[in-house]
Amino acid sequence: MRIYKAKDYKDMSRKAANIISAQVIMKPNCVLGLATGSSPIGIYKQLIEWYKKDDLDFKEVVSVNLDEYKGLERDNNQSYYYFMHENFFRYINIKPENINIPNGMEMDEKKECENYNKTISDIGGVDLQLLGLGHNGHIGFNEPEEAFERETHCVDLSQTTIEANARFFNNKDEVPKQAYTMGIKTIMQAKKIVVVVSGEDKAEIVKKAFFGPVTPRVPASILQMHNDLTIVGDEAALSKI
Ligand code: F6R
């Protein structure tokens, strides 16, 4: 496990964007596993900037997103499809057919999970997976459980996650209660994993997840077993380790 300490959110974003950019330069047709949330927004901004300067080219890159709310239309401004397009894809030259995000409008859970697993295996797995970290230790929407869920599945979101996400909706009742998410096994099969964490409110869970016991009660703790894990955090998020 490598830990890079950044001064602040901007510095964290730049450092993590450098790692992703190195991946794209070394393997132009790489598969990037991408995340939504507030942590990666600065990374996407930085990558867009480098793309505009002609330092990066995404024309052969394939992306696969971690998760999507179940029941939100793509054009709902809270869907992760919308988020990814607004914050990243519409500014770069990634091909639309190379973008993969679970289909939140597929109500047949079994069908969607099988489809997404097949998509990931057909593209040959993930080269670099970018992750944020939930306050309860979730990665993707893999919530604290009795056992690690392996592949794409439909989850009932925990109360803490619903509350944390309520800030993006008019009220808590509008937050979807379920989501599709890549499973832990798929995440762990990524060749490289980069976790980005920012802010003092993440300090406690960073300590638990990366220096505490490996347990499905803290899903991110499994990442300790990955052989190419990089954590990029700002001083506040790394203040307890
Ligand atoms: C997003 C995702 C979530 C977030 C996590 C942290 O696709 O899967 O696991 O990474 O909830 O969110 P932020 O970055 O908003 O603190």
Image (tube, grey):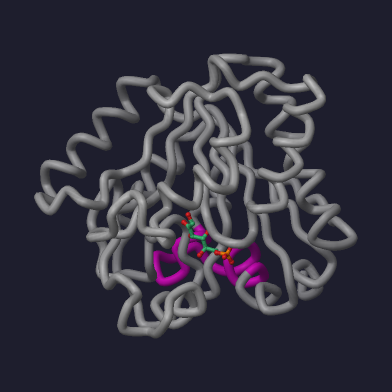
Q: In the visual, does 213 lie left or right of 8?
A: left
Q: Which of the pair 220/69 is nearer the observer?
A: 69
Q: How many marks?
A: 0
* Residue for point 36% across, 41% down: 101
Q: In the visual, does 160 lie left or right of 112?
A: right
The answer to which quarter of the image holds residue 19 is top right
Q: Is residue 170 above or below residue 75?
A: below
What is the x, y in percent for residue 47? 72, 36
What segment is highlighted magenta in the picture? 206-221
The answer to which quarter of the image holds residue 128 is top right
Q: Quadrant location of the C terminus?
A: bottom right
Q: Is residue 219 above or below residue 126?
A: below
Look at the image and say whether residue 213 sits in the magenta stretch: yes
What is the x, y in percent for residue 223? 54, 51
What is the x, y in percent for residue 220? 51, 60
* Residue for point 30% across, 70% down: 176
* Residue for point 23% across, 57% down: 154
* Residue for point 74% across, 69% down: 237
Q: Is residue 18 above or below residue 172?
A: above
Q: In the visual, does 162 lie left or right of 153?
A: right
What is the x, y in percent for residue 203? 70, 74
Q: In the visual, does 229 lie left or right of 55?
A: left
